[in-house]
Amino acid sequence: MADIIVFGAGGRTGRTAVAEAHRRGHRVTAVVRDVDKYADLAGEDVRVVAGDVTDAADVARLAKGHDAAIAAVFDPAKAADEFFVATAHALLDGLAESGVKRLAWVGLASLLPSASGELLMDLPDYPQEYRAFFLAHDAGAAVFRDATTALDWFVLSPSGDFDHQGVRTGAYRKAPGAAESRVSYPDFAIALIDEIDAPTVHRAHVGVEDER
């Protein structure tokens, strides 16, 4: 049994990560901005707390005593480039202070290398309307890539996109970026918790997709 803290637990990715960790018998701290709004997350061995993932002191306070952290975060009220960079710095500093050794950063498929080696977002037919958001997210990930840290971080994303209607199959595989690839939220959560239970990815970004 491990103690896992999930930042952004109110979102769909965060919720399924909380559920999968709880399913495996882990103790979970679900961090949200508004506890009343997400009170339904609470249960046996799952506590819901309010926190600011962009504040290193808050991260350190909440993460103390945990074995691993998951960050599945976004704040539409803040500029994306500022938010992701501030969050990454707060996690680096706060988790170091609290003694957490393992971090899962939920990333974007657009930032994965495709089979050709080019980033998915750089392929000719890939939609570009959210490119500024892609780059903002990558600026956050770059904080980890450029850091000299003992934190064992990794970035996990769908290889293409989420299958929003998909169910838990219990099976997934690692795959390069591909626009047509899909993974269900529950299977993505399995991949996240697998990497906490038995780490295989270190300081790298990998994508996962459902086995079909």
Image (cartoon, grey):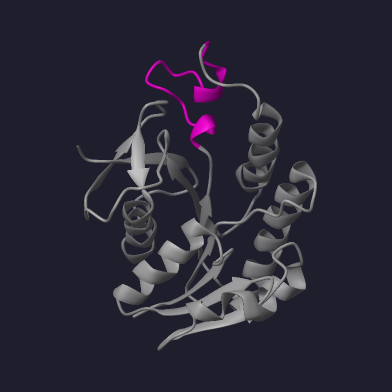
Which is more toward the observer, 87 or 43?
43
| Relative vertical location of residue 112 with respect to residue 125 in this rendering, above or below | below
Question: What range is drawn magenta here?
Answer: 109-124
Q: What type of secondary structure mainly makes up the magenta span?
A: loop
Percent x, y for residue 191? Answer: 34, 54
| Relative vertical location of residue 55 with respect to residue 49 in this rendering, above or below | above
Magenta highlight on residue 194: no
Percent x, y for residue 119? Answer: 51, 23
Give the left or right position of residue 123, taking residue 199 as reference: right
Percent x, y for residue 186? Answer: 34, 57
Position of the C terminus by quadrant? top left
Magenta highlight on residue 121: yes
**Residue 48 figure quarter:** bottom right
Which is more toward the observer, 11 or 153?
11
Q: Is residue 103 visible?
A: no
Q: Which residue is depicted at the point 61% across and 42% down?
A: 145
| Relative vertical location of residue 26 with respect to residue 93 in this rendering, above or below | below
